Image: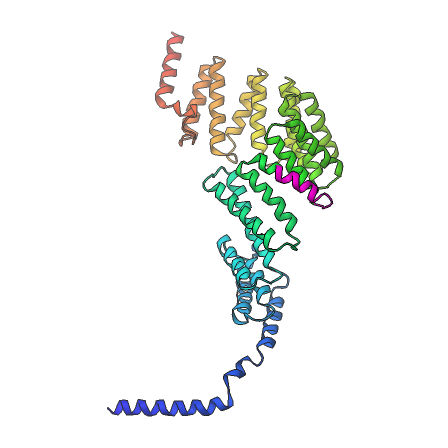
Amino acid sequence: MKKFIIVEICVVIAIAAGFWVGRFTSPFNDYAKYYENADKAWSKVREMNNPPVTYDEPDKNRLRKVRAAYRAVFENYADSRWADDALYQLALLPRTDEEGFALYRRLIRDYPDSEWADDSMYAIAITTYRIAEELEKTRTLESLTAYYDRALALFNQLIATYPGSVLQEEAQFTAALCYKGRGDLNLALTQLDNLKFELSRSPILYKILYATGDIYFEKQDYENARIEFTNVVDSGDPDLAPLASFGIAQTYYKEGKYDEAIAAYQKSIDLYSDTHAGQEANFYIAQPYAKLEKYDEAIELLEKAIAAYPNNRNVPDWKIYIAQIAYANKDTARAIEVYQQFADDPTHNYDSRLNAQYQVAEIYKEIGDMEQAIDAYEKLLADFSEPHQNTAHDSRNITENYVRMLKAELLDEDK
């Protein structure tokens, strides 16, 4: 009972104290400098973020602090002029795509009149589109069409919601590419043809022409592909002209016009040697030479290209191609040498190395050198204990029993 009385008295005193203190510290006083404090908070975070951090910022502690400071601005000063800016800047530094999407969506929802609203919608759309592209490249086809459909819906929403946006043209263009990604090539062509006229005076025109040529190439309509690629080359666009020039060479090669392909690849090399496309042409030019059975020239060109561009991501494939050309030229010694060097190089892909070792054994067997073939098969079993990922790969038939059988046959022949 006494405790109750004591507590009751304390409560009364606290209420009384609060009443009198409130007369001097009204809750309205907390907001008297709301916008001034917002300005200070924004200035502080801009100071902290100079130079600007990036997603790959090595100083993770600084990155965390900048993220926290941006969040503090839009959480504490949601009605200030800086809230949408802070929200957008934080969205540029997400830990995951999902987190970035959530922040962009929040900006679109809470600040639909923000100068960043269209940027936010575009960011979600283009990221979704790129995810779909990556799934396509890696052949991870799960939900591929769904991603293109989602990106297309977002691009169309941006076009309808923000008609004056500077991102309109890019949105229209990438929306057309979504149809291509879904496999609707004719619909993609129709969309791009419409954009050619609508955006005929826009800098984006040559991107439209190149994409159109690329779709014709995919449809195996090589003549129309060349027309579009030639228009891009003639434009002199520094980014797209080299790609289009390389594309022209590819069309000739696909058509089996190997002399024309060689001339087109060489033109790409001569004009655009300082670009990625020009460098690629140094490798691809070997293919039409090989088709024309000019094997020595093809190998010489590939060796020269590998020496000049050792860091090209396709160098391993081109090394294997050298072995294949040598084999086609009936130079089995050279083919074995290249395959064996490849198999012994641990920097290459495991399955590719396994296949190279298998090819060494198979070539020895084909030319009747069974002792060398047996040694190569034994090396295959010793160096590559895990089978090839392709369950249909012939190397999976090479077992200890198979090698014992070959040895027994060799002994019988020697008797």
Q: In the image, is residue 255 part of the stretch drawn in magenta?
A: no
Stretch of the chain drawn in magenta: 190-203
Residue found at x 64% / y 54%: 163
Prevailing secondary structure class for the magenta stretch in the rendered image? helix
Residue 182's x, y, as percent? 53, 38
User: Where, by quadrant of the figure, is residue 165 drawn?
Assistant: bottom right
User: Where, by quadrant of the figure, is residue 315 drawn?
Assistant: top right
Residue 262's x, y, as percent? 69, 24
Q: In the image, is residue 197 part of the stretch drawn in magenta?
A: yes
User: Where, by quadrant of the figure, is residue 373 drawn?
Assistant: top left
Q: Is residue 113 left or right of residue 358?
A: right
299 lies above or below 74: above
9 lies above or below 382: below
Residue 39's x, y, as percent? 61, 73
* Chosen colour scheme: rainbow
In the image, 110 versus 195, the foreground residue is: 195
Residue found at x 70% / y 31%: 227
In the picture, the quarter occupied by the C terminus is top left
Residue 282's x, y, as percent? 67, 30
94 lies above or below 184: below
Q: Residue furthest left?
A: 1
In the picture, the quarter occupied by the N terminus is bottom left
Q: Please indicate, yes or no, whether residue 338 appears anywhere in the rendered image.
A: yes
In the image, 327 versus 74, the foreground residue is: 74
In the image, 149 versus 132, the foreground residue is: 149
